[in-house]
């Protein structure tokens, strides 16, 4: 609430509309959904009037005034024209500039991995409050040629100097300052540069110059500040003031940039050029590494040169599940996301959701109870499996899910604890989605954690350090306690859906714990309700079971859902928090392959997302 109030005050001071800083008033339409009055679906609208973005070319145009914008002439967030279609490839990301760059890479002959790496570096330029080279993430790759599925973990581990209980707490177990999520003590070892370059070297076809030059050019020439970036700058204004180097990058004359302003970052262009020319060593050794260590130490952290030099990418086996005949591949630990998505879908498979009707009281009640049980298991069991045993087989078991489904009472809401997943164990945070015409699929979720991360910026290098240490528990003795080298629990869930080994969908989202529920709902919308991918993303959502702002029993609900449904949920005993027409998060990006081989992308109108096809 404090940040929302600060944003409104700044809006008044700067003389701009406060609607860029908050959700639109109730009644704002999605602009892309089919409705009872016969409005065309997003797919039908796209077929009649293909978006200009799919026809533009050239990364040099990505930040120019003639390019597609996620806001209207009044600086308001646009809720329509987010989809894209192509025959050769589709890229759906949280920023048009990055999607355009990815589509250009495919047009130039690159594969989906080449595009993913180019997009990754570009997003660090034009969505700097959410991700960048000071952070980390996960990449899930499906090879059309070999059928191989690879999960690349470039998550940020705790520095060697970190320890359990490292943040000050009072006698009631409450944190006494903000250093768990702000400043040097919140910084973990960044993995993005090694992760992206590993993927390029191992699975890509292009050179570093080819995939990195568009991002470097974008940093040099600049991009337009969107309504979302303006809002984030306003809500985090105190952080930008507190951390001088961060403020130098993202404040203009001491205030947030206005919607439509051009933002350039020559320091980041310099750093990316060093990585382009010198590879990962240019980041993890030498002057950039020294600048990171100094900035973190000056802000009270424990990152060392040895931490950076010793960072390793890890290859893991994706979590695998099945939902109504579709294969679902997603993120394994240290992410909790993939396992929890599979658990939610496994529970839902025991019900005829289509018969209930989309977003009916019965549907949302069932979905809520499934989320609540799965999130209880997530909170109890999830951890880095390099350090802690986790019953992954039990959590993804159909039998276990059936036992949970049997506990759902259709006539009332319940409070659940964690289940006995061990009893079913057998022996045996920005997101983007890319698919090319060959059926190669890449899903990537990456982050610096909170908006503007730790606030720490190595002077002269143009990027923000993550605050990923906040994803550990502050308490000692838990599965997710701090340990040197351990990777904290995550909700990031890059996901791929196949049928008979053929590509169907790639999907994921940023949004902390809400990633899981958002991705599960979009998958269900497509499979259970036969929705077009853009309609599936734009459709009103709920979230329940785990959130930093509510109790575990509360349903957060977008108020585009009919009021009689909301009242029906209350009568069943659900506490309900009406969020307005659109939540800020999660923001789902997805691409599907249609039966005729056409690739269709959807992007979330809750922030700046845009799909671009070639």
Image (cartoon, rainbow, N blue to C red):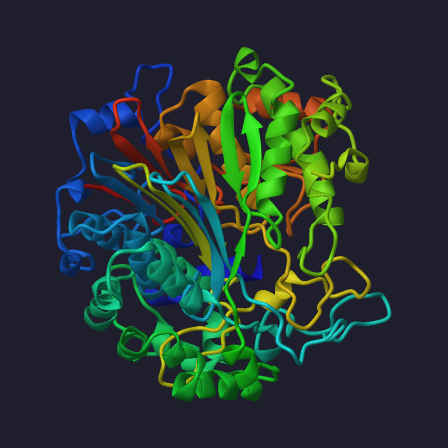
Query: Residue 173: which quarter of the image?
Result: bottom right
- In this rendering, the answer to whether 519 lies above or below 358 is below
The residue lying toward the viewer, choosing from 150 and 395, is 150
Residue 375 drawn at (x, y percent): 68, 41
Seen as rendered, the residue at the extreme top is 355
162 relative to 433 in the view: left or right: right
Report the label total. Answer: 0
Tell me the quadrant of the picture where the C terminus can be found: top left
Residue at 43% in and 84% down: 285
Residue 63 drawn at (x, y percent): 20, 59
485 relative to 127 in the view: left or right: right
Residue at 33% in and 63% down: 121
Query: Residue 296: which quarter of the image?
Result: bottom right
Q: Quick check: can you spot residue 477?
A: yes
Q: Quick check: can you spot residue 551?
A: no
586 relative to 572 in the view: left or right: left
114 relative to 389 in the view: left or right: left
Seen as rendered, the residue at the extreme front is 146
Tell me the quadrant of the picture where the N terminus can be found: bottom right
- In this rendering, the answer to whether 244 lies above or below 65 is below
Residue at 27% in and 37% down: 438
Residue 368 drawn at (x, y percent): 65, 30
The residue lying toward the viewer, choosing from 484 and 231, is 484
Residue 248 drawn at (x, y percent): 37, 80
């Amino acid at each position: 609430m404090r940040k929302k109030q600060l944003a409104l005050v700044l809006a008044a001071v700067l003389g701009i509309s406060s609607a860029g800083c908050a959700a639109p008033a109730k009644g704002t339409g999605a602009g892309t959904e089919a409705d009872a009055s016969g409005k065309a679906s997003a797919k039908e609208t796209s077929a009649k009037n293909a978006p200009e973005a799919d026809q533009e070319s050239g990364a040099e145009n990505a930040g120019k005034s003639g390019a597609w914008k996620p806001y209207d002439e009044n600086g308001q967030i646009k809720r329509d024209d987010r989809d894209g279609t192509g025959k050769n490839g589709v890229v759906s990301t949280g920023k048009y500039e990055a999607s355009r760059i990815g589509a250009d890479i495919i047009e130039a002959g690159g594969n989906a991995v080449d595009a993913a790496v180019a997009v990754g570096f570009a997003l660090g330029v034009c969505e700097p409050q959410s991700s960048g080279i000071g952070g980390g993430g996960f990449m899930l790759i499906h090879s059309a040629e070999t059928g191989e599925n690879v999960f690349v973990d470039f998550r940020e581990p705790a520095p060697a100097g970190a320890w359990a209980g490292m943040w000050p707490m009072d006698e009631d177990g409450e944190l006494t300052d903000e250093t768990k999520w702000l400043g040097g003590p919140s910084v973990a070892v960044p993995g993005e540069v090694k992760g992206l370059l590993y993927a390029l070297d191992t699975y890509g076809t292009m050179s570093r110059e080819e995939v990195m030059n568009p991002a470097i050019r974008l940093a040099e020439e600049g991009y337009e500040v969107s309504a979302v970036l303006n809002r984030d700058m306003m809500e985090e204004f105190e952080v930008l003031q507190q951390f001088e180097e961060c403020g130098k990058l993202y404040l203009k004359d001491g205030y947030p940039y206005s919607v439509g302003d051009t933002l350039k970052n020559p320091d980041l262009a310099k750093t990316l050029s060093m990585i382009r020319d010198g590879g990962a060593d240019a980041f993890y050794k030498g002057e950039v590494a020294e600048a990171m260590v100094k900035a973190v130490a000056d802000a009270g952290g424990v990152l060392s040169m040895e931490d950076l030099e010793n960072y390793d990418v890890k290859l893991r086996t994706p979590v695998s599940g099945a939902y109504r005949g579709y294969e679902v591949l997603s993120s394994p630990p240290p992410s909790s996301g993939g396992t929890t998505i599979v658990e939610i879908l496994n529970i839902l498979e025991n019900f005829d959701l289509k018969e209930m009707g989309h977003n009916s009281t019965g549907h949302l009640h069932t979905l809520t109870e499934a989320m609540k049980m799965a999130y209880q298991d997530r909170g109890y069991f999830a951890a880095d499996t390099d350090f802690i045993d986790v019953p992954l087989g039990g959590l993804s078991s159909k039998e276990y899910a059936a036992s949970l489904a049997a506990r759902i009472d259709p006539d009332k809401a319940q409070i659940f604890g964690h289940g006995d997943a061990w009893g079913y164990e057998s022996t045996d945070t920005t997101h983007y989605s890319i698919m090319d015409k060959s059926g190669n699929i890449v899903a990537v979720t990456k982050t610096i954690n909170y908006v503007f991360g730790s606030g720490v910026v190595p002077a002269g290098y143009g990027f923000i350090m993550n605050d990923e240490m906040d994803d550990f528990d502050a308490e000692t003795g838990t599965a997710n306690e701090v340990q040197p080298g351990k990777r904290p629990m995550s909700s990031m869930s890059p996901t791929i859906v196949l049928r008979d080994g053929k590509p169907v969908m790639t999907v994921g989202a940023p949004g902390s714990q809400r990633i899981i529920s958002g991705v599960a709902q979009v998958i269900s919308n497509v499979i259970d309700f036969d929705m077009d991918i853009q309609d599936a993303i734009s459709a009103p959502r709920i979230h329940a079971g785990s959130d930093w702002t509510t109790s575990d029993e509360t349903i957060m609900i977008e108020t585009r859902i009919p009021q009689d449904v909301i009242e029906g949920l209350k009568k069943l005993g659900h506490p309900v928090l009406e969020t307005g027409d659109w939540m800020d998060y999660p923001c789902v990006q997805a691409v599907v392959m249609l039966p005729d081989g056409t690739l269709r992308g959807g992007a979330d109108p809750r922030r700046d997302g845009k799909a671009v096809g070639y």
